[in-house]
Image (tube, helix red, strand yellow):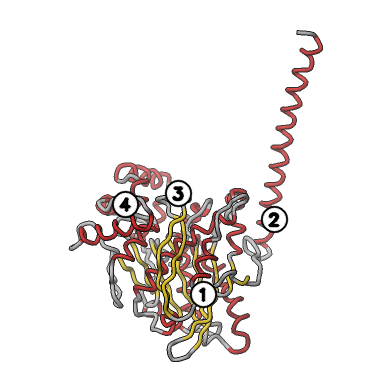
């Protein structure tokens, strides 16, 4: 080796190292600027992002009205990114019926739309060739306009990192869409559909942000991570409803909220806010025109009025083997607004038949066998009982010992990945398509 070559090699190595350091420095500066920008937005009262104020027309809308059946595409956690599909029913007449009467057909369609809300995320990731599942689904159902702006800012890894660092992850992605619906008698209303995505990226941390009533000088509280997301949705919806209604008022507006998991929690609270607003001067819609169906819904509030008649238009569908609806614990004072409807669970009368029917529908929808283990209900029951006994209050959870207890009990009682199968949206869809609850809610407790 010549002396010149020996001298050039270290020099080249230093250049590579300096180049890498420069890239890291630039990335750090860009991240710092992005975080500062997010925090400035919050200070200015703009929320995490400022979404476009206009709807966009749904391309290829069928314009369908009345009663019909449509095929909807989405993805399933059981099959990865592979597109699957199922048929759903739709009837404009639903939105002229009493919202406190449980409507199983509408609930089943909502179970699919809440799964589509999760599928939509990939469409907004750079370089993705994933279709716009929500836009396609709502076009099939005859909706006319849509906004999915929040997905644009909440589906990239970079944005998730920024939200985590900035502490601005109390958000969700959601779609708002409109359709003019007509009753058999000729009455018309403008339907606003709100379908909310489940936990995504750093939003998982927000699921743990229960907040503290004492910090607000209150004795009761609604889960902070969920309620912050719900408030953003309601504020956005209020602006759109006001624009639609103009000076004519909101008497011909109707609302439909749906979501799965974190999306279910946000939908539950947003619908409760809409119910409360209907009693005041800033109504989004009349109380008799507000509908809500949620799935795998966590508990959301410690307010003792959550089961009041005002919220009878909210229905929360849950799987007894799913851990998510059992958290935060009821023993800590947490409830959901409205009615709890529990799907068939292991040990219930007639469960074997309902489970077999669900598995058949699941495989028809996804092309794979259902991985859900119904016997996990016993493990979930035991875990909830253990946590309630060992961590009697939310304050105890915040201690080092409380966190260690959660980890210990989780590892001792459940297989987290296996229990997750019972949380899959596709399991909920298959159950909804295979059971028939008629028009009366099955309101039970856990």
Label 1 element class: loop
Please identify, in this view, whether the residue under mark 3 or under mark 1 is nearer the observer.
1
Please identify, in this view, whether the residue under mark 3 or under mark 4 is nearer the observer.
3
Image location (x, y in percent) of residue 136: 53, 65
Query: What is the number of the mark on residue 142?
Result: 1
Q: Residues within 10 Å of mark 4 (few under 14, many from 20)?
A: some
Side of 20 where 329 appears, left or right: left
Asked whether the residues under the numbered discs 1 and 2 touch, taking CB atoms below 8 Å apart as contact, a structural biologist would say no
Disc 1 to disc 2, C-alpha distance: 38 Å
Quarter of the picture containing the N terminus is top right
> Looking at the image, is mark 3 or mark 1 earlier in the sequence?
3
User: What residue is at 39 percent from the left and 84 percent from the top?
Assistant: 97
> Looking at the image, is mark 1 or mark 4 earlier in the sequence?
1
Q: Residues within 10 Å of mark 1 (few under 14, many from 20)?
A: many
> Looking at the image, is mark 1 or mark 2 earlier in the sequence?
2
Q: Can you tell which quarter of the image residue 377 is in?
A: bottom left
- Looking at the image, which residue sits at the far right? 4
Picture layout, residue 194 above or below residue 420: below
Please identify, in this view, whether the residue under mark 2 or under mark 4 is nearer the observer.
4
> Which of 55/225 is in front?
55
Label 4 element class: loop
Residue holding disc 2: 37
């Amino acid at each position: 080796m010549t002396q010149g070559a020996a001298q050039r090699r270290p020099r080249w190595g230093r250049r590579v190292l300096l180049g890498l350091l420069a890239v890291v420095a630039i990335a750090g500066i860009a991240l710092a600027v992005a975080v500062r920008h997010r925090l400035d937005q919050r200070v200015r009262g703009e929320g995490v992002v400022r979404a476009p104020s206009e709807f966009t027309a749904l391309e290829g809308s069928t314009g369908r009205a009345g009663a019909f059946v449509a095929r909807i595409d989405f993805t399933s956690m059981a099959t990865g990114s592979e597109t699957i599909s199922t048929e759903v029913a739709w009837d404009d007449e639903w939105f002229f019926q009493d919202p406190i009467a449980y409507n199983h057909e509408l609930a089943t369609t909502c179970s699919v739309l809440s799964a589509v809300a999760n599928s939509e995320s990939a469409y907004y990731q750079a370089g993705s060739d994933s279709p716009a599942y929500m836009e396609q689904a709502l076009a099939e159902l005859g909706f006319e306009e849509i906004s999915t702006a929040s997905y644009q800012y909440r589906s990239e890894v970079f944005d998730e990192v920024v939200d985590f660092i900035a502490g601005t992850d109390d958000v969700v992605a959601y779609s708002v869409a409109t359709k003019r619906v007509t009753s058999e008698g000729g009455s018309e209303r403008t339907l606003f559909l709100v379908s909310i995505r489940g936990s995504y990226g750093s939003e998982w941390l927000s699921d743990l942000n229960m907040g503290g009533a004492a910090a607000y000088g209150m004795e009761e509280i609604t889960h902070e991570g969920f309620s912050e997301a719900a408030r953003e949705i309601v504020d956005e919806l209020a602006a759109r409803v006001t624009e639609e209604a103009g000076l004519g008022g909101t008497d011909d507006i109707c609302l439909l909220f749906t979501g799965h998991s974190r999306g279910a929690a946000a939908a539950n609270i947003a619908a409760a806010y809409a119910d409360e607003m209907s009693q005041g001067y800033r109504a989004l819609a009349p109380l008799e025109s507000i509908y809500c169906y949620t799935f795998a819904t966590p508990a959301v509030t410690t307010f003792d009025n959550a089961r009041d008649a005002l919220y009878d238009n909210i229905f929360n569908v849950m799987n007894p083997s799913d851990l998510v609806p059992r958290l935060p614990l009821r023993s800590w004072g947490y409830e959901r607004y409205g009615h709890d409807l529990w799907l068939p669970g292991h040990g219930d009368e007639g469960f074997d038949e309902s489970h077999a029917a669900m598995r058949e529908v699941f495989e028809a929808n996804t092309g794979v066998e259902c991985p859900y283990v119904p016997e996990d209900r016993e493990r979930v029951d035991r875990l909830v009982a253990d946590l309630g006994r060992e961590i009697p209050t939310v304050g105890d959870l915040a201690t080092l010992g409380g966190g260690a207890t959660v980890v210990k009990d989780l590892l001792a009682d459940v297989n987290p990945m296996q229990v997750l199968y019972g949380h899959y949206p596709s399991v909920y869809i298959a159950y909804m398509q295979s059971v028939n609850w008629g028009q009366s809610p099955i309101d039970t407790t856990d």
